Image: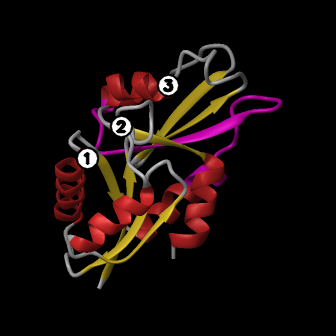
Amino acid sequence: MATFIAFLRAVNLGRTRKLPMAQAKEWLTEAGFDEVETYIQTGNVRMGTSMRSRARVERLVEQVLEDRCGFDVPAVVLTPSELRRVYDDAVGLVPPLDGEVRRYVTFLKATPDPEAVAAVDAWAHEGERARVVGPAVHWWLAKSSHAARLSNARLEAMLGTGTTRDLNVVTTLAQRWGR
């Protein structure tokens, strides 16, 4: 049995995009996934399956959740080793900002265009930096995310669909599921 981790995009935001993780776990189990486990309400799901194709797993997760929720639920699916690699990249990067900095990781659904990667890597607004490494964008903010120009929406406009997690969440998930 293969194990995959799905990062669900834009769930539990506002009143119209509610997806309790207990419900997601139930629906994915009913769809044939094994040992489904979730972590906090931001859409982090680990599951086992006999499927070997990440693309097939991603499509099934999205279809099941869209059918049950009534709204589109994009998913970015990784293997445990891919999650571990993103985490290792994150902790291995030298912070490009001084002082107290919040760290984020945006998991990308598809390989971005090299020109878009260069634009993100060149991002240099005061107190904001970002770097694309493999299937993820690593970013640093020396200010509130509400005051920043860099956001998941801006990154999606530049690179395509992605979903963002605080580095603390990525660290916990890598420790739990990145084996």
Tag 3's secondary structure? Answer: loop
**Separation (CA) of disc 1 from disc 2:** 8 Å
Residue 176 lies left or right of residue 91; in this view the side is: left
Could you tell me how far apart the alpha carbons at marks 3 and 2 are, in whole angstroms?
A: 19 Å
Secondary element type, mark 1:
helix
Magenta stretch: residue 146 in it?
Answer: no
Where does the magenta region start and end? Answer: 89-114
Residue 94 numbered tag: none
Q: Amino acid at mark 3?
A: Ser
Between discs 1 and 2, the one toward the N terminus: 2
Give the image location of residue 21, x and y in percent.
43, 57
Mark 1 in CB contact with mark 2 (< 8 angstroms): yes
Q: State how far apart marks 3 and 1 are (Cα).
A: 25 Å
| Rendering quarter of residue 57 | bottom left
- Pointer 3 or 2: first along the chain: 2
Q: Residue furthest bottom?
A: 1
Q: Which residue is mark 3?
A: 151
**In terms of sequence position, does the residue under pointer 3 or pointer 1 come before the other?**
1
Secondary element type, mark 2: loop
Viewed as shown, does residue 158 lie left or right of 129? Answer: left
Residue picked out by circle 1: 69
80 to 63, vertically: above or below: below
